Amino acid sequence: MEETLAVRRLDRLGVVLVVAGVAAAALLPFIYVKANRIASGKPMLLMQLLDQPSVIILTLLLVSSACAVLFLENAYARLAISTLCLAALLAAIGFVATSFTPEGSTAARMTPGGGFWVLLAVTSLIISDALVKVRLKPWMRVAALAAYACLLGVFLWSGLLNSLSIMREFANRGDQFWAEAWTHVELAFGSLAISVAIGLPLGIVCFWVPKLRAALLQGLSLIQTIPSLALFGLLMLPLGYLAAHVPLAAALGISGIGAAPALIALVLYSLLPIVANTVVGLEGVDPAVRDAAAGMGLTRRQILTGIDLPLALPVILTGIRIVLVQAIGLVTVAALIGGGGFGVFIFQGLGQTAMDLVLLGAVPTVIFAFSSAVILDAVADSIRGPAA
């Protein structure tokens, strides 16, 4: 009976994460030692690197983190141990990469293997689970995000990770990286701003005119079924024709390729979540509140701006979060039509069979999307209030 109770106390998520972590450490390469950026490289398991102090410390912390997630109920203790484990993981990959890089070599590449990425994902999930159980207030979630960003920044600033392949690629393309990063931000937030400016009024009209709602939402849903690359391609011909025959369009930078078709496609994809969430948010407002306001002599516009939209704002912000995360991901595909962004590195890397270059585009995209989701969730929850 006692054994049964002990098993039931085990965290089920913890069991899954520990099994995944053990499998990654035992079976997947921790790092690939490559002579150059396109070589297959020599895989090195974590267990093969136990002659290095940083790996020994990491192994001890991994075991401690596994025990904590399985048996400790205190979320703060889990958070502290897993954060130390995350720092040790970054330090270990940096020290290992430095130790295997020949002195003075610019061609050698030390690429993190599947074992490193799985351990990073497992550790991050343990941290996320602990943060959820701690039940941080919205502003504290943003502070936690900033703290982990600072932790990563310390490792990058220290130069400990400079021997990693992704950092070598960054060193070779620093100016281009920041230019594409700015383009990625412009396309993501620009499409979001235009989508909100169009989608919010459409959502209000759909709420006021139910007969229009079904037709409009079905039309926007149809757009969502078109593959992103196909939609980019469909826009190239009309925009190219417009640029060729309308001088003003060409002067504004509109053409069949580049930012114009990318921006239009992103806006089209973004309309459905904003319109649908606006309708849902407005429908969630208590009709009695609206009737009371009308009884006090408020006009329809005053009710909308003073009551409906403020009460529906958390739901609308949820739609905006969906749109922003979706746009950040879709901008990478826009690189195929000259739209720019981090997708430039991804597709260049795929074309050159250089996975290090792919990582230079993929990792910042994931961080950008995750950070945006956390911040917007925190804003929505702070507006929603404690009752949520």
Image (tube, rainbow, N blue to C red):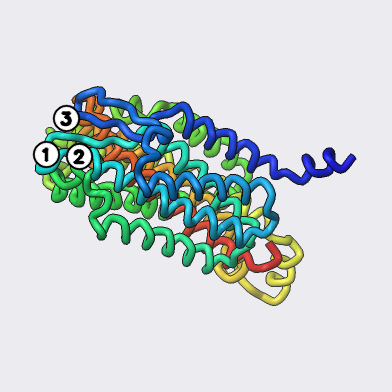
What x and y, as percent, mark residue 370?
44, 49
User: Which residue is label 1 attached to?
Assistant: 105
**Marking on residue 101:** 2
Q: Are marks 1 and 2 in contact (CB under 8 Å)?
A: yes
What x and y, as percent, mark residue 316?
54, 55
Q: Residue at x 21, y 35 (%)?
A: 109
| Inter-mark Cα distance, 2 to 3 | 11 Å
Q: Earlier in the sequence, mark 2 or mark 3?
A: 3
Q: Is residue 303 shown left or right of residue 41?
A: right
Q: Amino acid type of disc 3?
A: Asn
User: Which residue is label 3 attached to?
Assistant: 36
| Badge nearest the viewer, 2 or 3 | 2
Q: Residue at x 47, y 40 (%)?
A: 119
Instruction: Determine the secondary structure under disc 1.
Output: loop
Residue 357 position (above or below residue 278): above
Give the quarter of the figure containing the N terminus.
Answer: top right
Q: Amino acid type of disc 2?
A: Thr
* Res. 339 in view: no
Q: Nearer the viewer, residue 124 or 107?
A: 107
Q: Residue at x 16, y 47 (%)?
A: 171
Residue 261 position (above or below residue 387): above
| Inter-mark Cα distance, 1 to 2 | 7 Å
Residue 8, quarter of the rendered image = top right
| Badge nearest the viewer, 1 or 3 | 1
* Res. 34 in view: yes
Mark 3, other Cα within 10 Å: few <14 / some 14–19 / many ≥20: some
Give the quarter of the figure containing the C terminus.
Answer: bottom right
